[in-house]
Amino acid sequence: MQLIKRLCEAYGPTGREDRIRDIIRSEIKGLVLSLKVDTMGNLIAHVPGKGSKVMVCAHMDEIGLIVTFVDRRGFLRFAPVGGVYANRLVAARVVFENGTIGIVNQETRNTQDQALKFDKLFIDIGASSKKSAEAKVQVGDIAAFQQTALVVGRRLVAKAMDDRLGCYVLIEAIRRIKKKRTGRIGNNLYFVFTVQEEIGLRGAITSTYGIQPDYGLSVDVTMTGDTPECEKMAIQLGEGAAIKVRDRMMITHPIIKNRLVSLARRRRIPYQLEVLEWGTTDAAVMQISRQGVPSGTISVPLRYVHSTSEMADLADVESATRLLTEFLTCTIE
Amino acid sequence: MLKELSEAFGPSGAECEVQSLIKKAVTGHVDRTFEDDFGNLYAFKGKKGKKIMLVAHADEVGLMIVGIERSGTLRFKPVGGIDPRVLPGKPVLLTKDRIPGVIGHKPELFSKPDELRKIVPAESMFIDIGASSKEDAEKQVRLGDYVIFDTKFTDDGDVFMGKAFDDRLGCYVLAQLAKKEFDAQIVLVFSVQEEVGCRGAKIAGFKVKPDCALAVEVTSTNDLPLDGEKDINQAPFLRKGPAITVADQSVICDRDLVNAIVETALEKRIPYQMKPPMVGGTDAGAVHLQQGGIKAAVVSCPVRYIHSPCSIASYADLGLLERLVPLVVTKFIEEIKCN
């Protein structure tokens, strides 16, 4: 629980994942044979075993805001990095890499009746002039949401659970696999903590190319269809790990999907089948790397994705961890 | 050379005229040149040390003939991103033979008032080469023929005007760089088909597999007079020096490279400006995702009215970019760690 909190609260917008990488590295070093950081910044951990080369990834980055302009009075204009919703930003707290805190707010003249657009929003860091603002923040600096992670009953409320929950699931799987005897690991495992997922799955493109796996799996979050008047979707919070069937950019390879379903049934791990109509994950580019890699996804259901307060169910996190551990340790024929 | 490059015929997919100009300019200054099957031109210099790739794209935005009407007028589609507002009434040249034509539109005299207020999509415009019939037109053009803007290069000593500065200015800077010596392997790439999706650079980046890459580009200025003097972004400006990219739609530039570029500019007292983030895309976007990932960054010359029949750039900005790029290459050679 402490680790999930730390992962979610840490600063790590797209392109600025260093701190997340440091946390993960310190958690898994000693548990893996080797750790390396590639050119793009992906963290790659190798846990050797007999059998197929399996790559599993979760992305370290979260959505962010990049400063485009500092005005005369020290207000910052910005552009979104990744899928940021303008209407979820007003009054949000943000933090820059150097710790500078800001709040987002909006132009009020002539904007009441309009859909909120990014060019009507600004960040206030409490500066009184361009000069004092630029002493702290420059054009090109990237802010992330600033939000404390809270446990509310069985549920967790935090920012950046997309995809720090995935990172957590991978770390936890490494720990559980380590407890088994090495001889019982049925696959040659590469755990990859990727960068720049939110702006086009970029870290996964290069890391998959480098690793050249036989099979690929991503662990990410998925939306739910269980909030008032939401888009229809057969995923509910607390009903188990989601096994992806398809999303906007990928149809899960049947080998992976069927295997995940049969493992979940055999081990009595709660699961739900996921058809996501709006997004995708790193697995979409893994499956078309080089000559093609059969790929799939285990998702953790998440409400209010890409907001300052996302909500997950801890039982789903556990189901995803169990399912991943089973998948990775049993030989894929 | 700027004039020749600007006036050359080279829309995406038909860059040979540009490539032969560049080849002529760099031959004798580099170890060897090579053209791949896709049309990218490579110039290699130096045999050992770090491998540094510089890329500028040879192609420009243009039009392609997609239909010939019974009347002899020609339908076209843009090749690359062109704002339809800049098209009507502009003189154009068809094919490498440079057949003159004009982008026709409905005359004002015969237009209804509401038609005059509307922006006409490119699909409803046509090119008129003065042909009297379909048969007459077909004697000169075929479907798939390329069209460029008919714009002469001019200059007044301070600024210069012409077409295709995007990215012939980058090509020019790279051709000048070919004359310099470095303690590394330098690969200059003149890429094709950037304007339709950075297609040439994907192939070039994969093939060259450099330790790091720098795209030398142009960037649109945003420095026109604003309504009511609002305190919002107007960068990049003409005459304020090369623009440095932190991130655009296609790439988050490697941090070490960006820092090295900024440090170089500061140390050598070269004025520079930061490009507003998350706007546009360049070959760096294509290159950085090749192989297991390639460190990449972008520097650009500010230019007014890119992707239009006539752009304006300043000799001061271009001169500063020409100074900055070789210094940056030296800095990369000295300081950038490679895997």
Image (cartoon, rainbow, N blue to C red):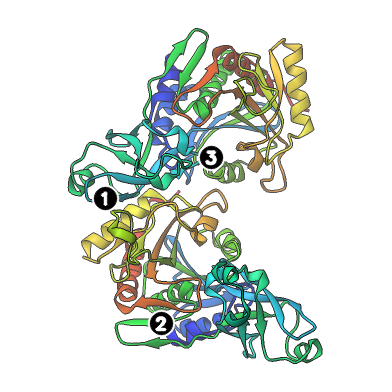
Q: Which mark is residue B161?
A: 2
Host chain of mark 2: B
Query: Where is A288 relative to A145, above or below?
Result: below
Relative horizontal placement of residue A62, taking residue B109 as reference (left or right): left
Q: Name the residue rendered at 56%, 75% in the picture.
A: B87
Residue A55 spot, x, y in % from top left:
62, 33
Residue drawn at x 42%, y 37% is A13
* Mark 2, secondary structure of its residue: strand
Q: Position of residue B56 (x, y in %)?
A: 48, 69
CA neighbours of label 2 inside 10 A, class few (<14), some (14 to 19), many (20+): many
Q: What is the quadrant of residue B203 in the picture?
A: bottom right
> Can residue A219 be seen here?
yes
**How crowded is the residue under tag 1: few (<14 C-alpha within 10 Å), some, or many (20+)?**
some
Q: Are marks 1 and 2 on the same chain?
A: no
Residue nearer the viewer, B266 or A210: B266
As helix, strand or loop, the secondary structure at mark 3 comes to loop
Q: Quadrant of residue A207?
A: top right
Which is more foreground, mark 1 or mark 2?
1
Work out whether residue A185 can be spotted. no
For mark 3, what is the residue? Answer: A197
* Furthest-front residue in this view: B113
Secondary structure of the residue carrying tag 1 is loop
Q: Residue A63's x, y, as percent?
A: 46, 37
Q: Is residue B13 above or below residue A94?
A: below
Please name the amino acid that badge 1 sits on.
Asp
The answer to whether the residues at label 1 and label 2 have Cβ atoms under 8 Å apart is: no
Question: Which numbered dot is residue A71?
Answer: 1
Q: Is residue B75 left or right of residue A78?
A: right
The amino acid type found where label 3 is placed reads Glu
